[in-house]
Image (tube, coloured by chain):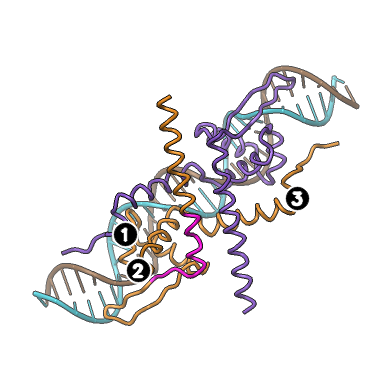
Chain colours: A orange, B purple, C cyan, D brown
Amino acid sequence: MKKQAVCNTTTQCQSRILAIKDAMEILSGKWKFHILGTLLLNDKMRFMDLLREIEGIAPKMLSKELQDMEMNQLITRTVIDTKPITVEYALTAAGRTVSPLIDELAGWGTAYRHTLYNKKDA
Amino acid sequence: MKKQAVCNTTTQCQSRILAIKDAMEILSGKWKFHILGTLLLNDKMRFMDLLREIEGIAPKMLSKELQDMEMNQLITRTVIDTKPITVEYALTAAGRTVSPLIDELAGWGTAYRHTLYNKKDA
DNA sequence: GAAACTGATTACCTATTGGTAACTAATCCT
DNA sequence: AGGATTAGTTACCAATAGGTAATCAGTTTC
């Protein structure tokens, strides 16, 4: 009799795995957390503001990631008829739900760094 | 006077951004969360067990990700002198700290899916 | 003696990610 | 007229991620 998977075949595990896959896909890439984090601090920001706040991002990437997140309904894009035209980006309710996730990630990163530091001391 | 970044230049923000960057780097890739999640369920697993439990992963990827995480001290690798040789992988204390992060991610993915579903109903 | 199981490694290939640099069109300021 | 600001787009390129398939060496089972 061939050995086979056990624990990860339960319905519970399967839907959990699926949920993680979903989350990773939607929040994938180098910049999404930084953009979302910046929008969490300001609630309405224009393209050039984001470009200035997020160090190192190129307009191409910012544009692409914003489109991505608009499609996934994490942010809204509003064209305002000023001269020259301005565009406002803001989080949706769904977008705001990433806040605890970002906190957790930042917290983990910080704790991890401390762990390594203490180990080196020992 | 040129406009410049404001909020993301504070020391607080900078270290937060750094922590997120760290976490993303260490936990990057398609498979790490799945491997860690599986190890959270079993605490000691052999290579072939992981290969069987994690659907779709190739031995090459499993091997590479395990090495990666061993280097970052999230897991331990123990060779056991049975015949044929077996190798046990287990989470370290640091590795176990990803548990709440995985929960948060899975929770977010699930909630996100429900949000979309409800919107389609409306 | 042949096949299968152990834990991998290697070569090869493709697709995605992400970066650089230049450019656009409209409008405003000097 | 010249330059800056708005919000992007385009072409091009390099590096990385990740997949497939084959192979290895030792041991055990049929």
Give the SS element for disc 2: strand
Residue lying at 69% horizontally and 31% vertically, measured from the top left: B46
x and y percent of residue A77 in the render? 42, 73
Read off the residue under disc 1: A53
Per the model, the C-alpha gap separating discs 3 and 2 is 44 Å
Q: CA distance from mark 2 to mark 1?
A: 10 Å
Residues at discs 2 and 1 in contact (Cβ within 8 Å): yes
Work out how far the residue at label 3 is from the one at label 1, CA to CA, in angstroms. 45 Å
Q: Which residue is mark 2?
A: A45
Residue B85, position as x, y percentages in the image: 70, 22
Q: Nearer the viewer, residue A26 or B94?
A: B94
* Magenta stretch holds residue A98: yes
- List the residue tagged with mark 3: A10
Coordinates of residue A12 in the picture (x, y in percent)? 72, 53
Stretch in magenta: A89-102
Which one is in front, B108 or B59? Answer: B108
Q: Earlier in the sequence, mark 2 or mark 1?
A: 2
Chain letter of mark 3 equals A
- Dot 3: what SS? loop
Asked if residue B119 lies left or right of residue A93, the reply is right
Q: Is residue D4 left or right of residue D6?
A: left
Q: State which quadrant residue A78 falls in.
A: bottom left
Quadrant where the C terminus of chain B sits is bottom right
Task: From this view, report whether residue A8 is shown above or below residue B83.
Answer: below
B53 in magenta: no
Between B4 and B93, the one lying in front of the other is B93
Residue type, mark 3 in image: Thr
Q: Which class describes the residues within 10 Å of circle 1: few (<14), some (14-19), or many (20+)? A: some
Q: Amino acid at mark 2?
A: Met
Give how far across and how far down residue B110 sits, in percent.
62, 60
